[in-house]
Image: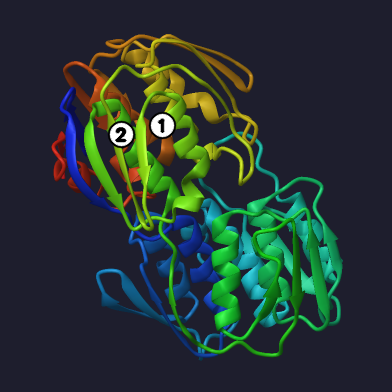
Amino acid sequence: MKKIVINGMRPLYGEIEISGMKNSALPIVYSTLLVNGKCTVDNIPFVNDVLLSLEILRHLGVKVTAKSSSCIEIDTTDISLCDPPMDLVRQMRASYYLMGAQLGRFGTAHVCYPGGDDFGIRPIDQHIKGFEALGAKVNVSGGYIDIEAKNTLSGANVFFDVVSVGATVNVMLAAVRTEGVTIIESAAREPHIVDLANFLNTCGAQISGAGTDTIKITGVKELHGCNYTIIPDMIEAGTYMVAAAVAGGKVKINNIIPKHMESISAKLLEMNVSVEEYDDYVVVSRDGDLSCCNIKTLPYPGFPTDMQPQFASALCFADGVSHIFEGVWDNRFRYVDELRCMGANIDVSGRNATIKGTRNSLTGAAVRAIDIRAGAAMIIAALGAEGRTEIAGVDVIERGYVDMVGKLAAIGADIFKIGE
């Protein structure tokens, strides 16, 4: 079994380069199915989820060619409608973007129910609501989702009952080549929604309002190929910011968009961490002890749920009592048992966690990555813990982070992989 081994309590000094955003790359990769031509996409993070998505596209007849270590060409010129392989689709949540992409190009889609991390109930009812508003008929049975346009799709007003990134993306994909105007209200506002809209517009789409809660899409007949560069990964950047806060030292984190980091930076400042912002990088350092704080996760621009586990690890080392309320997913605290193995004092009640922290609260132990961000949280906890920590579930972590072990080792962490 592959494991990450960390000997903790080593300060970090140096620079880290942030990769492209996984949460942008995934919808953009699937959205190329709407294009008649070739797209060159740069700053691609070759994490496991992206590699799996590219493999799914290959099974659909898409030609994928690597141009460099972070650039690919995706040729969707000659594809025809076919079913994506169930064994691949079931491995990740983002595979549900096949629904909107195939519906937008072919007027029909037949996709098995997606897999992915277990954060509790994650329904697709808002996706279905959007597809039906555009004129599609949806049937869910036998583990498959069948979507078919009754005649042709047409623009419509879509109002989501809850803010959903996935549903916003899927309706955008379905509507971009649909006749008429589609208005999405209560849309997700995340930076990767804006990035997807920018990519599609570069391909000839007409989308406005991305980044607000109302998105307008004027349908076009065709999309053409383009060259595009994916934005930096705010969650990867935030993870290394928290790692620097816990381990101590001074770390420069390059290739970021500081605007995207505001909620993360604000909490670190509240925790007595120095965060110096520049045009495209931040410098994070800590001299004194960490301070406790309270966190409530919310859709963007609120505090991101994907940073909640990392901050929970950090708050174990903060003096005092901290509270976290998880406002997005029902079951995001499953990783807490792993932190308890290291000595964490955390009580969980529903969506609330109470963390009683002290400076030297954690010691090394054998733990595992429950999901991508929980795996990052285990690494952060191990960086601050006394002794040796072994983390199983390396493949889970590598679904969302590019060479996390190598990047941390380069700035002074005593970290390595075994069992490969």
Name the mark on residue 383: none
Q: Is residue 157 left or right of residue 75?
A: right
Q: Is residue 100 left or right of residue 64?
A: right
- Give the total of numbered labels: 2
Q: Residue at x 35, y 9 (%)?
A: 358
Quadrant of image for the N terminus: top left
Q: What's under tag 2, amino acid-wise?
A: Ala
Badge 2 marks a residue whose secondary structure is: helix
Q: Residue at x 69, y 68 (%)?
A: 172
- The one of 19 and 400 positioned closer to us in this rendering: 19
Label whose residue precedes the other's in the sequence (2 or 1): 2
| Among the 4 quarters of the image, the one containing residue 377 | top left
The residue carrying mark 1 is 310
Picture coordinates of residue 210, whole percent (x, y)? 66, 64
Q: Is residue 159 left or right of residue 169?
A: right
The residue carrying mark 2 is 243
Task: Tell me whether circle 2 and circle 1 mark residues in contact (CB < 8 Å).
Answer: yes
Q: Residue at x 83, y 81 (%)?
A: 180
